[in-house]
């Protein structure tokens, strides 16, 4: 059975639920949290009450045999605001890392209450990237050293989402430096652990309600249970790594979530396009709407064409992932790369259509324009995606 692009009745219903949530909850509060640069607790609480911000919701999305449900949710949320969408969907990243690493018993203990409840939601963090490493996961320097039955963690992390308010950090650390990226493991570190220091919050261009700060782990002592997956599983993985089998945990996690990131980029682009389209229909110059002028009409046509193409690439990657098909040409990277280019282009051209008003906060376009660049940066830059795609095509590692 080949790739199918039509949404099922279940997908359409899901889209309508998320669109209703976005219009009633996200849209009225998005600008407020963009300005305050705070975790959008009011939105998360309402999302939790509606069952959207809950582990069961994420597991349902990931269990979809078509792979499309998660992308539908990501696009709809991001069409209202990328920062809020990321705040709601961000648990998919650490939960994916847990799903790839933990035993079934650990999953049953860790996952159920990890996001709090409908009255008191919690945020969690995936801490992988570092100041001196970025996309080069082999250069991570945070270490985990065996100490008795437990572990001692030392190092620092940057770009861990929810850093300021996270109750738990899922930290990628080196247990065997000689193996590079394949010698890493995942550790679960409660925020209150002695030796955990969260630095000053970063002020960012976009995604401003998702908090980031440097995190330092100074001789943080963890019990044996702090190692996600357990010692036996880790030792087997290290043996495989020494025999050149397997791949890095951080890379596995990013590969699994790239179609989701692409869908978010599509959502931001679509939201900007819809604002520009409405404005083009309403604004009149020289006796007709600006949308009836050929130059503006051509921009709108190009926007829609690129958005639909990017969505189809994301759906294809998700479909292949769900079916367990090998992405021999790095289709996930292709989807993310193209969607990142589309969202930058569409948000910029949408502002040009709206003119001076688009340059102000009177429309959501300036916020979308500020959010757009991140899609070519996080979870692998555009340059990294091109290297991955070229390496797959040439069947050799390109640096």
Image (tube, helix red, strand yellow):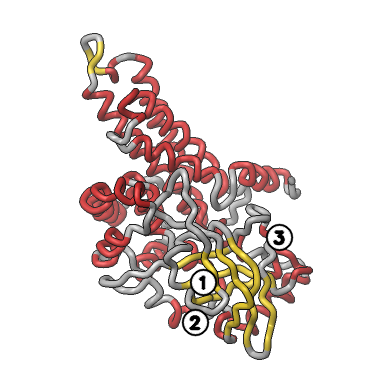
For label 1, the residue is: 98
| Secondary structure found at label 3 | helix
For label 2, the residue is: 106
Mark 2 crowdedness (10 Å alpha carbons): few <14, some 14-19, many ≥20? some
State the CA–CA distance, disc 3 to disc 1: 20 Å
Mark 1 crowdedness (10 Å alpha carbons): few <14, some 14-19, many ≥20? many
For label 3, the residue is: 138
Mark 2, mark 3: which one is toward the viewer? 3
User: Can you say whether 332 is above or below 103 in the image?
Assistant: above
- Residue 377: x, y in percent? 55, 46
Query: Are circles 3 and 1 on residues that touch, CB within 8 Å?
Result: no
Q: Nearer the viewer, residue 112 or 84?
A: 84
Q: Nearer the viewer, residue 277 or 317?
A: 277
- Residue 269: x, y in percent? 40, 38
Residue 323 seen in render: no
Task: Please tell me which of labels 1 and 2 falls first in the chain.
Answer: 1
State the CA–CA distance, disc 2 to disc 3: 27 Å
Task: Please tell me which of labels 2 and 3 falls first in the chain.
Answer: 2
Q: Residue at x 70, y 74 (%)?
A: 175
- Residue 352: x, y in percent? 38, 24
| Secondary structure found at label 2 | helix
- Residue 256: x, y in percent? 53, 59
Q: Residue at x 38, y 77 (%)?
A: 112
């Amino acid at each position: 059975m080949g790739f199918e692009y039509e949404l099922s009745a279940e997908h359409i219903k899901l889209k309508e639920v998320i669109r209703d949530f976005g219009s009633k909850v996200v849209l009225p509060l998005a600008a407020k949290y963009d300005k305050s640069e705070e975790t959008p607790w009011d939105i998360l609480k309402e999302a939790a009450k509606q069952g959207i911000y809950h582990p069961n919701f994420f597991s349902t999305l990931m269990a979809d045999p078509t792979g499309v449900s998660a992308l539908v949710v990501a696009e709809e949320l991001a069409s209202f605001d990328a920062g809020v969408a990321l705040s709601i969907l961000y648990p998919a990243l650490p939960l994916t890392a847990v799903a790839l690493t933990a035993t079934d018993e650990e999953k049953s203990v860790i996952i159920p209450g990890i996001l709090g409840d409908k009255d008191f939601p919690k945020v969690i963090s995936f801490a992988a990237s570092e100041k001196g490493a970025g996309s080069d996961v082999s250069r991570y320097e945070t270490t985990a050293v065996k100490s008795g039955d437990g572990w001692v963690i030392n190092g620092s992390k940057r770009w861990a989402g929810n850093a300021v308010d996270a109750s738990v950090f899922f930290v990628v650390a080196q247990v065997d430096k000689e193996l590079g990226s394949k010698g890493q493991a995942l550790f679960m570190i409660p925020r209150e652990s002695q030796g955990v220091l969260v630095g000053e919050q970063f002020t960012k261009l976009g995604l401003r309600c998702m908090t980031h700060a440097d995190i330092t782990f100074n001789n943080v002592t963890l019990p044996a249970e702090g190692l996600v997956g357990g010692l036996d599983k880790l030792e087997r993985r290290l043996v495989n790594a020494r025999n050149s089998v397997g791949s890095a945990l951080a890379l596995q996690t990013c590969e699994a979530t790239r179609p989701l990131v692409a869908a978010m980029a599509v959502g931001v682009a679509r939201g900007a396009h819809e604002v520009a389209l409405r404005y083009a229909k309403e604004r009149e110059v020289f006796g007709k709407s600006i949308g009836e002028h050929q130059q503006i009409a051509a921009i709108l046509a190009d926007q829609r064409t690129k958005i639909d193409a990017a969505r189809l690439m994301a759906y294809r990657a998700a479909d292949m992932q769900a079916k367990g098909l090998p992405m021999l040409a790095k289709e996930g990277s292709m989807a993310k790369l193209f969607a990142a280019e589309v969202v930058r282009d569409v948000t910029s051209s949408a502002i040009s259509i709206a003119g001076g008003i688009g340059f102000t906060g009177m429309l959501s376009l300036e916020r979308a324009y500020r959010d757009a660049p991140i899609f070519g940066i996080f979870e692998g830059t555009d340059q990294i995606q091109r290297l991955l795609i070229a390496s797959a095509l040439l069947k050799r590692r390109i640096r």
